[in-house]
Image: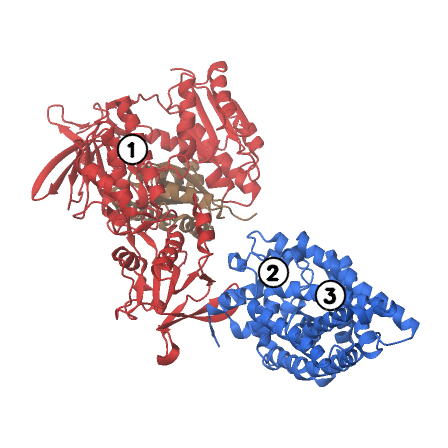
Amino acid sequence: MEEKRIGVYVCWCGTNIAKMVDVEAVAAKIAKLPNVVIAKDYKYMCSDPGQEMIVKDIKEHKLNRVVVSACSPRIHELTFRKALENAGLNQYMFEMANIREQVSWVHDNREEATIKALDLVKGAVNRVNFHEALDKRSVDINPATMVIGGGVTGLSAALELADAGNKVYLVEKTGNLGGHVANIDLTFPGLNSAAEVLEPLIYKVNNHPEVEVYLNTTIDEVFGYVGNFESTIKSGGKEYELKFGNIIVATGLTPFDPGKISSYNYEKLPDVITSLELEKMLKEGNVVKKDGSEPKKIAIIHCVGSRNADYHEYCSRVCCLSALKFSNQLRSALPETNLFQIYADMRAFGKGCEEFYASTSKKDVMFLMYDQQGDLPRISKAEEDAGYEMGIEFYEKLSGEDIIVPADMVVLMVAMEAHEEAKEVAHAVGISLCGNEFYIERHPKLDPVATTTDGVYIAGTCQGPKDIPDSVSQAKAAAARILASIARGTVEVEVTTAVVNEDVCCGCQTCIKVCPYTAISFDEEKNVSVVNEILCKGCGTCGSACPTGAIRARHFTDEQILSQIEGLFSKEMQEV
Amino acid sequence: MEFEPKIVSFLCNWCSYTGADLAGTSRMKYASNIRVVRVMCSGRVDPTFVLKSFREGADGVLICGCHPGDCHYHEGNYKCLRRYHFLKKYMAQMGLNPDRLKLAWISASEGKEFAQLADEMAETIKSLGPCKVKEEMEIFD
Amino acid sequence: MSTVVNPDLNAKLVKFGNKSEWNECYHCGNCTAVCSLTENENLFPRKVIRQLQMGLKDKFNSNIDPWLCYYCGDCSETCPRDANPGEMMMSARRYLTSVYDWTGLSGLFFKSVPALIIAFVLVAVSIIGVGYAKQFNLESIMEFGHVFEKMLIFSVVVLILIPNIFHMFWLTIIKEKIKAPFLLYVKGIWDLFLHMFTQKKSLKCEKNTFRWFEHLLVVFGYILLLITTVFLNWFSTENTYIIWFGYIVGGLVFIITFDFILERVKKKKELSKFSHPSDWLFVIWLFLMGFTAFIVRILIDTDLISNNLWLYIVHLIVIAQWGILIVPFGKWTHFLYRSFAVYFANIKSAELNS
């Protein structure tokens, strides 16, 4: 058996780690562990010089195993694996100890944090001793893509893929394409017609030879893995067997129900309407009260359901600009009407948006700020002779006054919520949700449209509130990612699947019962279980159920994990 | 010196490990007794791992998985739950306080909950005192 | 009790200012931060802008703060939105002048240039009419002029200025429910006159030192000119001291006001960038008063006056327009309101702090 030569690298991460963990001491102590050839500390391991150092050391010191003790493996495991590969080492001969997210950032006692970091690195070093080289498996990519959701995001993504000559299956739950943008009159900040954006997209998609549109269709379950997904969908009474290599989820949003906020009296007072209802009125060119008369005073309340711990803590990102857009539209439609913007903070980010805010502020619109930490505005019916229908009472933050805003019509800028069926879709395609039901991306900055499931991408408002340009950008980004994988033709998939040691397997078939993917079958002839490596996703449940230890979860084997536990408690340098 | 227990924590890669990372990125502070071992799924947590931890000197073991219905592998967490109940009984039979083992569901967005859980677990184990398994086993060695 | 917001106030104030840039304000508060004069009890200009934007009319009418600003222009310079708070405060002062004025003429003249021209022409025609009635006899016209000036001062003070000050007092103190003991009012009198004649407070604005000095000279020059012409009978006196004294103060007034006019033409400083018709009238008429008085006395001394009677009539017209229109209804009133504002503000803060 070859000699084990381990290199250990402890990252400072600037001061992020070094401030709370004595990285130099950790490196010095780890250097004394058996098989550890070198142990170094360095400012930024993930930087180019950091990675080059690993590559150089592997070559110089003939290292065959590497441990990096830095941030979460969720962030940089792949970076360092690549470095190993560049040095000609199998990338699985690598282990990471997370001493940033799970040590330096969460503890405030330097001594305790250093002890913990040391334990974790010991565990990692012990584990890496038992790592074995694994080969990546290459699979062909089916160039077809399934796009779930026929809104502006789904349409853009579908066209991008189809224009490159690839088959696209566009699945839409409702009977129409266009999503929420179809209900919008004008877009901000240019006040261009939304139909100008949408209609060409719908026309092209409907007439594109490469796009198959399935309306009134939902997805129950998707089988397979990146490059080779398959699903059976029911549409128009018929069943279709679809095979595709990648998935773009663009399920979009649901508007917040303002009935949940009692002080707004939505549906109790006739002329309290949502932004969607006003959008409809503007589209029809007829902004009137329920009794058919013209409103003389219109108030627009921002952040309805957004940025409030009782409803949603996040900002819905489009309401401020939509509200400003409404001001412009109403100012032209009803020049004599008094307009009030009752906002919490004006967030006019984005190209041309601050300018739009500035130009709107010159159009005789009164901006009033309410305190979101305090009581929300209260809408109540005004007295008969007040000269207006409703009074909106609140504490105006900038003047420090309790005021009443007179209004004949109140528009509630409702928040964006994740689609109500986001969870079902997440289960069908195997992706995760954040706490607020939006989908989680693989990395918020470095990989914003990918998910933790290879081959499944997210785009648009299903990932978080956003406007049309951002949604379309994400759609095209996801399409670009898929086009790149189609162009490559093959994809390397993780081989951390289960594997059966046929000599030890006693044929009890326990593993077959626990496998969620029916990836294990029974070979009657040999009387052993057999793992289908294509179906197996490597959860390792079979490994913990196997009574004989015949089935092993690669890269998470019993001996690897047990040795990691041993490492955590090893006394070898406790007294050093 | 005050007793500082060591707690081995098995976190599933998809929900709980991400949740623990979130506690870090949100700079939440919690007790430093937790030693994390990452597994792909809570269903991978073999009872042997838990017993091995106690054997090696752990004073407590904390297993975290995705919430019921949210498992990345559909149902691994249910299998973990079954094994957990079995393990608790087994521990009691072996004279090991079952309170030293805990299973909890932590989603990827529950950084705060993870931090609270880590503190609670540390408190529980501190009140139970050091686990003697390792010392006692050494007599046999 | 909550106040109902009123979007009309904004439109109303626009008529008293050059523009309505204050709508650009997004309340960063830089203006208040740089202001040398704002204090805890009197936060301006941001708070004033807010009351204006929101149309809190009652609060705005009772607000004393616009008078406490001496328009150094720091706020307008620092404003990131170019909302021009300094000029807004100026517009607010014009508006408040019209609020205090019980006759309503003030508002009319501030808002309408045609009304102003008609009034000025009417006064001029009346004076020429008087000249005609006196058959353009120099002595009787001068005698009329002398009596007219005294009568004018008396009636403007009694009929317009005193009632308006009481109106201001009612709005800013009584209506705001400030119940200060009488002693406070007595104690404050010294301050009232100090500020009325010296504008001491404006020295706090660092930029203002030279302008304060100019202003001080104009105030004294103007008052002394008033005393020499009206009470010491400068045009008819034989006393050399008074004659020379009259020359000095008259010259002082027209030289400094000439500089004021020049600055408004040049528009270099914040405070002279924007000029409302009322501002032009004020400085030009002040200049004309000093200048015509100066020339008239020169003509008297050189015995040329009888051949140039028209010049005295012009002087009289300027005086009449000044006394009938500018003093009671125009910019002149800031002389009183500013000092009374300091007086009332001191009483108010003393009462609130006790």
Dot 2 and dot 1 residues touching (CB under 8 Å): no
User: Is A341 displayed left or right of A177 in the figure?
Assistant: right
Chain identifier for the brown-coloured part of the image: B
Chain identifier for the red-coloured part of the image: A
User: Is C296 displayed left or right of A516 in the figure?
Assistant: right
For the C terminus of chain A, the quadrant is top right
Q: Chain of mark 2?
A: C
- N-terminal of the pair, mark 3 or mark 2, is 2
| Residue located beneath label 2 in the image | C87
Dot 3 and dot 2 residues touching (CB under 8 Å): no
Q: Chain of mark 3?
A: C
State the image coordinates of residue A502 (x, y, percent, origin top left): 20, 24
Q: Dot 2, how many residues are within 10 Å of its Cα: few (below 14), some (14-19), or many (20+)?
A: many
State the image coordinates of residue A121 (x, y, percent, origin top left): 47, 32
Q: Secondary structure at mark 3?
A: helix
Q: CA distance from mark 2 to mark 1?
A: 55 Å
State the image coordinates of residue A462 (x, y, percent, origin top left): 30, 45
Check disc 1 and give the amino acid type: Ala
Q: Residue at x 77, y 75 (%)?
A: C193
Residue C124 against residue B113 in the figure, above or below: below
Check disc 2 and give the amino acid type: Glu
Label 2 vs label 1, nearer the camera: 2
Q: Residue at x 26, y 37 (%)?
A: A248
Q: Chain of mark 1?
A: A
Apparent colour of chain C: blue
Q: CA distance from mark 3 to mark 2?
A: 26 Å
User: Is A254 displayed left or right of C77 in the figure?
Assistant: left
Query: Which label number is shown at residue C288?
Result: 3
| Residue located beneath label 1 in the image | A479
Query: Between residues C299 and B53, which one lies in front from this camera angle?
Result: C299
Label 3 vs label 2, nearer the camera: 3
